[in-house]
Amino acid sequence: MKYTKPLLAAVAVLAIIGALAYALMDKPGAPAATFTTLEGKPIVLDELRGKVVLVNFWATSCPGCIKEMPGMVETYTQYKDRGFEIIAVAMSYDPPNYVANFVQTRQLPFPVALDTDGAHARAFGNVQLTPTSFIVGKDGRILEQKLGELDFVKLKALLDRELS
């Protein structure tokens, strides 16, 4: 019984140290992915090191995806010359002709890739819900993962910080 308090204190200290170590751990690296755009052009994620890259999984049938596209276009236009890139990855179940029509009618200025077999969704942690976005830092590590529509105020604050 006389060892209970020191033992509990030691366990508490170890738990705090463990939580701190976990919080300070390196962010996970983005998977080594090569996307293929609608035009058939390959985009190798590793070759975009030095830029902040938003990888956005979306679908033409997703209301939230459609709603956030104008904000993505505006953010891309504002930050592309400062080292920001967007890769919009259409989900495997999205018919390629629907994706091409969406890109053309909305005049999307950033690369749009097809995930024809779902390999990219699996590589990024088995993405199933859209929109799901990953913000990859200049060093190739995932800075943030966001399920649901992007908060463009937060995104722009992050870009201002990362691209300064």
Image: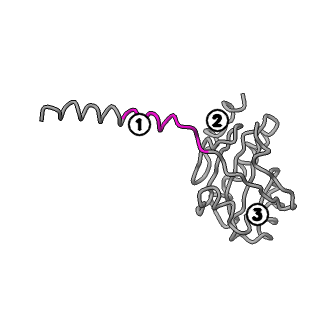
Q: Would you say the magenta stretch is mainly helix, strand or loop?
A: helix
Quadrant assignment, res 151? top right
Neighbour class for label 3 at 10 Å: few (<14), some, many (≥20)? many
Residue drawn 86% across and 61% down? Answer: 40
Give the residues drawn in magenta, as a range: 16-28
Frontmost of labels 1 and 3 is 1
Q: Secondary structure at mark 2?
A: helix
**Residue 48 spot, x, y in % from top left:** 78, 43
Cβ atoms at labels 1 and 3 below 8 Å apart: no
Please tell me which residue is depicted at 70% across the width and 37% down the height of the picture.
Answer: 139
Type of amino acid at the residue the image marks with label 2: Leu
Question: Is disc 2 in contact with disc 1, using a CB cutoff of under 8 Å?
Answer: no
Mark closest to the chain's N terminus, 3 or 2: 3
Question: Which quadrant is home to the N terminus?
Answer: top left
Contact between marks 3 and 2 (CB within 8 A): the answer is no
Q: Nearer the viewer, mark 3 or mark 2?
A: 3
Residue that protrudes farthest toward the top in the picture? 164
Amino acid type, residue under disc 1 in the picture = Gly
Disc 1 marks which residue?
18
The part of the image, by quadrant, that contains residue 14 is top left
Check disc 3 and report the residue beneath it. 114
Of the two numbered discs 2 and 1 on the same chain, state the one appearing first in sequence. Answer: 1
Disc 1 packing (10 Å; few <14; some 14–19; many ≥20) = few
Q: CA distance from mark 1 to mark 3?
A: 41 Å
Q: Rounded to the nearest whole Å, what is the CA distance between mark 3 and mark 2?
A: 27 Å
Display coloring: one colour
The C terminus lies in quadrant: top right
Q: Name the residue beneath numbered marker 2.
A: 158
